[in-house]
Image: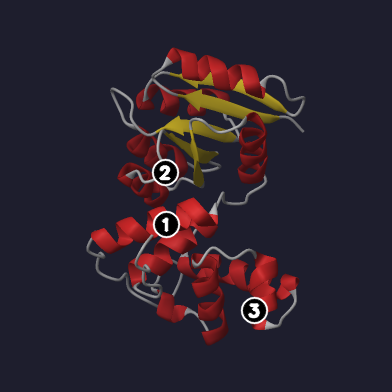
Amino acid sequence: MTIRVVVADDQEVVRAGFGALLGTQPDLAVAGTAADGAAAVRACAEHRPDVVLMDVRMPVMDGIEATRRITAAPGAPRVLMLTTFDLDEHVYDALVAGASGFLLKDVTAERLFDAVRVVAAGEALLAPAVTRRLIGEFARLRPRPPSPPTGGPGGGVDVLTPRETDVLRLVAEGLANAEIAARLVVGEETVKTHVSRILRKLGLRDRVQAVVAAYESGLVRPRSGR
């Protein structure tokens, strides 16, 4: 099945470059492009893509607000944020707004293809060495909002069982399911089940949102030196 992509960036050369790269893959297709956030929202409504490559900084409407609006719609596409450097406070905002991960604009072609396929399949793009550092840094710098009420989807982390809490803590540390399974001495399928339950109980979309929730709740504390 072809994965349909919308590329949103205010630089024409970036839109053209990503479009040309994606066009080399038989399973990827550019459904539309946009030069600002408002146009990205319209393009998603018109073309119904599977994935959006979204620049953080754009005129008219920035990528964060566009992401918030796009991911709030039923059947929303996955959003991959594009940024020029890895410690960008606006990327953290975008992850909270509903993005499934981020890519640096100087990403290699193969990394780009893999990222689009990963998020289209419903996974979050978590690069432990970069994404975890970014989330941890800006969670540390910003005061945490008041914890939401507990007792159901969208509630606080105290709705989780002790084992689910352990799994969430390890997810937030950047471990993959296989690594979590080895750490807890359980099967990988068991970990997948726990992750699914965590997302459902907390009303979260994917692992990136779970990492954000773990930091903002105080379950995981950023380490020094990141």
Q: How far apart are marks 2 and 1 (CA)?
A: 9 Å
Element type where label 3 sits in the image: helix
Is residue 180 something one can see in this rendering?
A: yes
Q: Is residue 219 left or right of residue 138?
A: right
Q: How many labels does the image show?
A: 3
Residue 86 shows which numbered tag? Answer: 2
Q: Point out the tag, 2 or 1, that comes first from the N-terminus.
A: 2
| Residue, far bottom | 162
Q: Point out the tag, 1 or 3, that comes first from the N-terminus.
A: 1
Residue 163 shows which numbered tag? Answer: none
Q: For the C terminus, which image quadrant?
A: bottom left
Q: In this view, does 186 lie to the left or right of 65?
A: right
Is residue 205 something one can see in this rendering?
A: no
Q: What residue type is labelled 3?
A: Arg
Residue underneath mark 1: 133
Q: What is the x, y in percent for residue 173?
A: 50, 67
Q: Quadrant of residue 181?
A: bottom right
Q: Which amino acid does label 2 sit on?
A: Asp
Q: How far apart are marks 2 and 3 (CA)?
A: 28 Å
- Assess whether mark 3 and mark 1 are in contact (beta carbons under 8 angstroms): no
Judge by depth and name the residue closer to the eye, 222 or 67: 222
Q: How far apart are marks 1 and 3 (CA)?
A: 21 Å
Judge by depth and name the residue closer to the eye, 180 or 217: 180
Q: What is the x, y in percent for residue 141?
A: 25, 59
Q: What residue type is labelled 1?
A: Arg
Element type where label 2 sits in the image: loop
Q: What is the x, y in percent for residue 203?
A: 47, 63
Residue 183 shows which numbered tag? Answer: 3
Instruction: Give the class, few, some or many, for how many residues have Cα within 10 Å of label 2's Cα (few <14, many ≥20).
Output: some
Judge by depth and name the residue closer to the eye, 54 or 107: 107
